[in-house]
Image (cartoon, grey):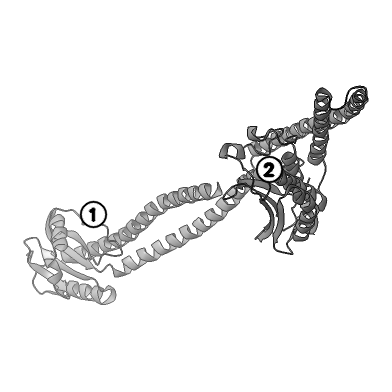
């Protein structure tokens, strides 16, 4: 979720910064050019005043010739060029040149001609196109020389824009640096914001996984985050408390019912045995009743074991599961030999993991017992230990009839047994007990097909100590 939320926030903040930075950059460029234009207008206005003074010569002629006033104007234009490097010229209205420094070649430019034409009609050239840092464009400003209400000449200046473009570029770099710094701050704030928002969600997800895997005492600790998430955390903890109470009541009921039914059942079986003494040997009805009574006793014992397995905590220890598997295989080998089944143990001789040795032994016994029940004479049951990264496994494979894909999805459910195996003794609770025993220590059980036939059951236990165990 963070990988989706964080890029969205970053894109939105980048869009906001660009939306602010772009107009700011344009305004900066326009302000720099406007400042230059205003300065050039002031300069051309000053030269226009000198030109007006020249036009007011003693002869009253417009073309005052090379008099002192014209020389003074030429000196001003020359000094202006030497100091600022800006070329300038004064042109009569009819296009003839009055004075220029250093020469009038720049007047051939299209922009200079446009400025001259506008000034002829008493318009100062103030609407020049914006010059950008990547454009090597010059700036032409023109002012009219007015005498007796008429435009008699025009002053035109040709300004280089290199310094102005450099200033615009520096301003843009400062804006870019400011926006980059703001973006970094925004990313940091987004990281903190997403962390603050999603921390309760991650904790809630981890706790939900713990409860789903059997650690029903897990709760979401009180943490920060938005008020809505804090309210969700409180509601989740209340729900988990209620679920745990219901499950505890269910376990207590199953344990109490199983325990309470054992005594009447034992008395009933005793009376059946006494009744059998009064009847002829080999009575089929008595044998059937005795068999069903013993089956009911096994179901009650398994129910009690299941309730205890789901309720008891795990005493986790660093256990050599290779040695444990070898020991349990040796214990079951006489049973296998009596059925004509070969029981072998393979894999790593020393494979350690964190597990409750008693619970793991009971789980492995249930799996081996189940494999021996369904493996026909002459086939093999193999117990294999292995280590794979963060987990260690004990795999039990058999050569029995196996299960279908639909049956694999149901194996391990309470009281479930395949319709094809109803003649095999059992209560249907053995693998459920195994799953409860493994889940208490952070382990799991998995079922799969075994080629060419049979079932493959894998017990998985963690190699590192779980943070919490029921």
> Residue drawn 48% across and 50% down?
13
x and y percentages locating residue 43 in the rendered image:
26, 65
Q: Residue furthest bottom?
A: 82
Foreground residue, 468 or 309? 309
Q: Which residue is mark 1?
A: 127
Q: Is residue 395 above or below residue 164?
A: above
Residue 360, image x, y percentages:
77, 50
Rendering quarter of residue 103: bottom left
Left/right of residue 309 with respect to residue 91 in the rendered view: right
Asked whether residue 221 appears in the rendered view, the answer is no
Horizontal relation, residue 334 to residue 129: left or right: right
Q: Pointer 2: what residue?
A: 374
Classify mark 1: helix, strand or loop: loop
Element type at mark 2: helix
Badge 2 density bin: few <14, some 14–19, many ≥20, Cα 10 Å: some
Along the line of sight, the residue nearer the viewer: 450 or 423: 423
Tell me the quadrant of the picture where the C terminus can be found.
Answer: top right
Q: Nearer the viewer, residue 448 or 462?
A: 448
Foreground: disc 1 or disc 2: 2
Which of these two is toward me, 452 or 129? 452
Answer few, some or many: residues within 10 Å of disc 1's Cα (few below 14, many 20 plus, some between 14 and 19).
few
Residue 113 placed where, x, y %? 13, 61
Residue 281 % position (x, y): 87, 27
The quadrant holding residue 169 is bottom left
Give whichever of discs 1 and 2 has the lower sequence position. Answer: 1
Q: Residue at x 26, y 63 (%)?
A: 40
Q: Is residue 341 left or right of residue 46?
A: right
The reply to whether residue 236 is visible in this rendering is yes
Compute the Cα span from label 1 to label 2. 98 Å
């Amino acid at each position: 979720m963070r990988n989706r939320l964080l890029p969205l926030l970053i894109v939105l903040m980048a869009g906001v910064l660009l939306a602010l930075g772009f107009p700011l950059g344009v305004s900066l460029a326009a302000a720099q050019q406007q400042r230059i234009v205003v300065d050039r207008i002031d300069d051309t206005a000053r030269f226009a005043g000198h030109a007006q003074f020249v036009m007011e010569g003693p002869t009253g002629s417009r073309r005052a010739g090379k008099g002192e006033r014209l020389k003074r104007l030429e000196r001003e234009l020359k000094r202006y060029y030497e100091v600022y490097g800006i070329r300038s010229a004064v042109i009569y209205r009819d296009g003839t040149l009055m004075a220029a420094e250093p020469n009038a070649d720049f007047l051939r430019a299209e922009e200079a001609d446009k400025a001259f034409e506008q000034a002829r009609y008493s318009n100062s050239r103030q609407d020049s196109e914006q010059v950008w840092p990547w454009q090597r464009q010059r700036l032409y400003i023109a002012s009219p020389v007015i005498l007796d209400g008429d435009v008699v000449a025009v002053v035109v200046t040709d300004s280089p824009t290199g310094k102005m473009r450099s200033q615009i570029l520096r301003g843009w770099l400062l804006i870019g640096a400011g926006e980059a710094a703001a973006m970094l701050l925004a990313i940091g704030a987004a990281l903190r914001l997403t962390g603050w928002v999603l921390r309760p969600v991650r904790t809630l997800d981890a706790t939900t996984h713990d409860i789903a895997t059997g650690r029903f005492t897990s709760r979401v600790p009180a943490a920060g985050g938005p008020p809505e998430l804090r309210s969700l955390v409180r509601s989740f903890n209340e729900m988990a408390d209620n679920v745990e109470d219901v499950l505890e009541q269910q376990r207590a009921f199953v344990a109490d019912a199983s325990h309470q039914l054992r005594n009447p059942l034992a008395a009933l079986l005793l009376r059946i045995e006494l009744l059998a003494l009064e009847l002829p040997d080999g009575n089929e009805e008595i044998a059937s009743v005795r068999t069903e009574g013993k089956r009911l006793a096994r179901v009650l014992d398994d129910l009690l074991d299941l309730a205890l397995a789901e309720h008891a905590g795990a005493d986790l220890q660093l256990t050599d599961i290779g040695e444990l598997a070898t020991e349990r295989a040796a214990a079951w080998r006489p049973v296998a030999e009596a059925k004509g089944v070969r029981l072998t143990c393979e894999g790593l001789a020393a494979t350690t993991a964190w597990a409750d040795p008693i619970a793991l032994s009971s789980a492995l016994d249930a799996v081996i017992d189940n494999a021996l029940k369904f493996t026909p004479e002459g086939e093999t049951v193999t117990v294999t230990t292995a280590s794979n990264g963060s987990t260690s496994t004990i795999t039990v494979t058999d050569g029995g009839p196996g299960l279908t894909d639909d049956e694999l999805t149901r194996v391990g459910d309470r009281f479930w047994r395949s319709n094809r195996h109803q003649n095999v003794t059992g209560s249907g609770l053995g693998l459920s007990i195994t799953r409860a025993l493994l889940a208490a220590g952070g382990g799991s059980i998995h079922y799969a097909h075994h080629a060419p036939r049979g079932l493959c059951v894998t017990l998985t236990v963690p190699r590192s100590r779980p943070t919490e165990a029921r």
